[in-house]
Image (cartoon, coloured by chain):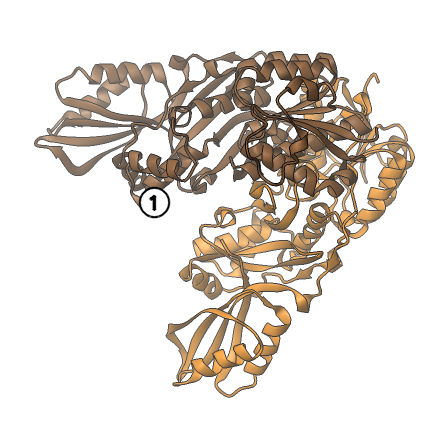
Chain colours: A orange, B brown
Amino acid sequence: MDCVKVALLGCGTVGTQVARLIGEQSKDFTARIGAPLELCGIAVRDASVQRDSSIDTSLLTENPSEIIAQADIVVELIGGIEPARTYILEAFSHGASVVTGNKALLAAHGPELYEAAAKAQVDLYYEASVAGAIPVVYGLRESLAGDRITHVLGIVNGTTNYILDEMAVNGLSFDEALKQAQDLGYAEADPTADVDGLDAAAKCAILASLAFHTRACIDDVHVQGIRDITAHDIASAADAGYVLKLVAHAKRRGEEIELSVGPTLIPLEHPLASVHGSFNAVVVEAEAADRLMFYGRGAGGAPTASAVLSDVVAAASHKVNGGHAPRELIYGNAQIVSVDDMQARFQLELLVRDEIGVLTNVTGIFARYGVSISAVSQTNSREAKGICRLIVRTHEVKRRDLHAALEELSHVNFVDSVARVMTVEEN
Amino acid sequence: MDCVKVALLGCGTVGTQVARLIGEQSKDFTARIGAPLELCGIAVRDASVQRDSSIDTSLLTENPSEIIAQADIVVELIGGIEPARTYILEAFSHGASVVTGNKALLAAHGPELYEAAAKAQVDLYYEASVAGAIPVVYGLRESLAGDRITHVLGIVNGTTNYILDEMAVNGLSFDEALKQAQDLGYAEADPTADVDGLDAAAKCAILASLAFHTRACIDDVHVQGIRDITAHDIASAADAGYVLKLVAHAKRRGEEIELSVGPTLIPLEHPLASVHGSFNAVVVEAEAADRLMFYGRGAGGAPTASAVLSDVVAAASHKVNGGHAPRELIYGNAQIVSVDDMQARFQLELLVRDEIGVLTNVTGIFARYGVSISAVSQTNSREAKGICRLIVRTHEVKRRDLHAALEELSHVNFVDSVARVMTVEEN
């Protein structure tokens, strides 16, 4: 093969960096691959828009199919479901391998795409779809191929981590921190996908599919966002030796898996506790390897382009030297655990009457529903006359049992309200 | 290919776990590789020794060549230079791929082995040679193939990290912490390779070769161990907002590289600061990806076996499906910077006369040698009558200039002694 032709679909923040780096590092790429990489075209919506000076405008086209037909590798950075899905299938049908960073598409249509790639005997790579520059897709797909993964938990959304960090470190309110994240370009004008946990949920589904060799999609993930987190929640987490993070969990229990995204109390000594600002990190626990963590930039043009290009090098190397990417192996038989049956440790806050005997009554109700308590504390500050705040931490319990207990508690006269329920991670 | 035959050389802590996992996870391996893995023999020094019950004793042999000749993949876990080197070359000459965890051999004879593998058109994998279960070899060799690495710094020796951590957290002396590490099996009876930094230096050479596409061997690494670190050093690091870690550094400066291992002050907010106990972590900084960190178990039978098996799966997959491991690409032209020319930030402690004008005289001498000071502080505690302790932190300076300044300082009458020189990492 004289050269490996790369068609780039999309020329936004990441695409621009991909094009720049292919140009700047061409000597390195040739050495690594065994043949030069050649950018054969860049498909954009509007070719007349002003571009970064590193973009060779003669490569721009508004007709993706034209460059897909010539390419050995198609890099899809358009995002969204359609037309990205159609272009990827078109690439496969022309025998091109595909590199994508499209988490929404993979979380919704992953299995269809994996199968189409395998059938066409080409590669589908997607390192950039989860946690930007961090090679966690590689880690799960290749580095842990000799092990059995039991648990993946990650901070995979930089916007929410930035917001929670600003709230914790600088004492901002959620709204102030969100506004600051928007001003800095970390958060979109419409922050729904980030703050409501949907972006993290898509990544959770991709990680789970890889870790457990099963089919998981975004609808399988129980999602809770951070919109209603208050400065009080963060302060009381800190008092108890925790930091509050938005965490994606994928856990294997026997032949079943649990998938969730939600605000989680992380002990200060846990490696995820020191992941600050817009950084991402994914902890993987495996039977033999024990605990691993992958840490780095979860977003941004150049970091994400680094992940895209590592995939391009791998796919190009296969075009030149033979071999192929690991196939997505769906040989597990994992059932997705329903929300009610999910198990976790919880921390909850109850506002209760400041009376003798209340603690016994509260713990008695938890006991009746099989909710085992690991710690209870009553804070000094009274919320209102005659009302005090109880913080209760449970052992691992089913959500169903917890909610049944909370339902009963919300109707008894000595409980004023249930203020907050969050999951707790162990060290 | 009906099955992929694996010959295991060595059946110690790691070898036993490799054999066990190949047996226990055979169904998973078959799915991942496309053909079953079959252990065709286990070479040991003494076949009559009692083994773990997971070892099929009928596979044991005292004649490695016999099983190398039958194997598709040879897993070398003997360690040391010879006979490991000879067996690996023998494996290549039979067309077998090799998976090894032998850092000493790679740090001394890496280039010879990489070339022999390429010539024989087989794979040489060595994930387990650096940082146990942590996929940092993968990260550098494949995941960052689209980027340019500027700096690698890692805690790659669990024994010394355990010792320093015990000194810092539980206030033990070096000797007490070493004894405890030996009692727990973290440190060898002869701890020289660990505490004097030689083990870390071998890993530093391997990481640098991968990161900078150059040839680096253990003799290129400037090494300083932790044997003379005192509780005082650790306490004064903590006072200044640092933790003291034994860190392997590999840094690119233009076309040159600097390789060193030594006690390093790490700011508390740096991701390496929270790497505790016998865990390892490697931070990689790259032009596009920015900062990444890989964290996990640096040693132990099962974690190291996980790394070995990921390599076995990759090599086996190539035997079944074609393709090959990335070749070790030596296309960089990196010169190794001599010790004197290495640059770093330093912290040093001077015992000086408690007199007016001493600070001016001390800083004047540093200035004369071009050593730029970032901070000076005088501790309250007097070490002896009329003597006080100065802590000086420098900007990035050449070791040569620092040492020239210290040489002069050691001869002036207002300086009693130079107590400690350590490098300082920035956030």
- Frontmost residue, B370 versus B155: B155
Report the residue that reaches farthest toward the left.
B385
Q: Quadrant of residue A305?
A: top right
**Residue at x 51%, y 65% (from the top left corner):** A230
Q: Secondary structure at mark 1?
A: helix
Percent coordinates x, y for residue A227 in the rendering: 59, 63
Image quarter where the C terminus of chain B lies is: top left
Q: Amino acid at mark 1?
A: Val
Q: Is residue B8 visible?
A: yes
Percent coordinates x, y for residue B253 in the rendering: 50, 19
Q: How many numbered discs?
A: 1
Percent coordinates x, y for residue A74 in the rendering: 81, 33
- Frontmost residue, A67 versus B380: B380
User: Can you identify the residue that label 1 sits on?
Assistant: B169
Report the residue that reaches farthest toward the front.
B48
Percent coordinates x, y for residue B170 in the rendering: 32, 45
- Examine the rendered structure and indicate whether residue A225 appears above or below residue B258: below
Mark 1 burial class by Cα count in 10 Å: few <14, some 14-19, many 20+: few
Q: Quadrant of residue B130?
A: top right
**Residue at x 85%, y 38% (from the top left corner):** A118
- Examine the rendered structure and indicate whether residue A354 appears above or below residue B129: below
**Residue at x 45%, y 35% (from the top left corner):** B158
Image quarter where the N terminus of chain B lies is: top right
- Examine the rendered structure and indicate whether residue A194 appears above or below residue B363: below
Q: Chain of mark 1?
A: B
Q: Quadrant of residue A57?
A: top right
Q: Is residue A6 visible?
A: no
- Frontmost residue, A228 versus B7: B7
- Report whether B4 appears left or right of A146: right
